[in-house]
Amino acid sequence: MIAAVDWSRPWFGPWRAWGERLPPGLPVPDALNALSADSPRFVPQAELPEGAAYETFIDRTGQVPTRENLHDLFNGLVWRGQTPLKRQLNRLQADEIERHGIGPRRGPVRDALTLFDEFGALWRDPPAPLVDALRRRDWLALFLTHRDAWVAHEPVVFGHALLEQLA
């Protein structure tokens, strides 16, 4: 699975150093743990107790239940590369679960956090014409008229589901 990722693709640039260091042949949690001894620790999905909320478990234990798939591999790489941001997203999710419990729907705050976590991008210091075009939803200006600006100001794909799709 790890070998299937073409780390030379530009959207994997921020994750390349981590991805290329992944030891082959290990289960995903072990491969992610081999990258760093820092928290969080990655554990097999089976260690998530039945009925426990994923985000609450991470918040309480510092362990991330991880499955054997690209989705969770990329989630782990983002945890390694953007630990403070992932911790904050997880803390906000755990707070919402503590306030409202787990129901048939997440609710608007958890939905927004989940969308960002799964499909978000970080865009640091983009030039004003790109920001303006994005706000206006002027896709022609954003992606064609100002396409040269993307070279110096490309966003970092953060969402692990989006990274999975790009693989």
Image (cartoon, rainbow, N blue to C red):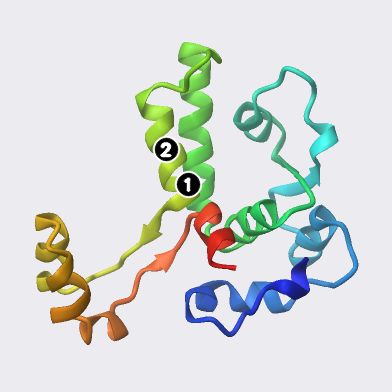
For the view shown, which residue lies furthest in the right direction?
Answer: 25
Q: Going by the image, does 82 lie left or right of 113?
A: right
Residue 37, position in %: x, y?
77, 59
| Pick the front one: 36 or 155 | 155
Q: Residue at x 37, y 36 (%)?
A: 112
Q: Position of residue 159 (x, y in %)?
A: 49, 55
Q: Residue at x 21, y 83 (%)?
A: 149
The reply, left or right, for residue 139 in relation to residue 97 is left
Question: Residue beneath label 2, please?
Answer: 113
Relative image position of residue 114 (x, y in whole percent):
46, 38
Q: Position of residue 73 (x, y in %)?
A: 69, 57
Q: Nearer the viewer, residue 114 or 145?
A: 145
Cβ atoms under marks 1 and 2 closer than 8 Å:
yes
For the residue marked with disc 2, what is the amino acid? Leu
Residue at image location 80% in from the left, 24% down from the top: 49
The tag on residue 117 is 1
Where 55 falls versus 163 (above or below)?
above
- 71 vs 47: above or below: below
Quadrant (top left, top right, bottom left, bottom right) of the C terminus = bottom right
Please name the residue shown 49% across and 48% down the image.
118
Determine the secondary structure under disc 1.
helix
Task: Decide which of 152, 145 is in the foreground and name it.
Answer: 145
Label 1 sits on what residue type?
Answer: Asp
* Quadrant of the image occupied by residue 150: bottom left
Which of the 4 image quadrants contains residue 115?
top left
Q: Distance of mark 1 from mark 2, alpha carbons?
A: 6 Å
Residue 3 against residue 27 in the figure, above or below: below
| Image quadrant in which the N terminus is located | bottom right
Q: Taking 24 as reference, is 17 left or right? A: left
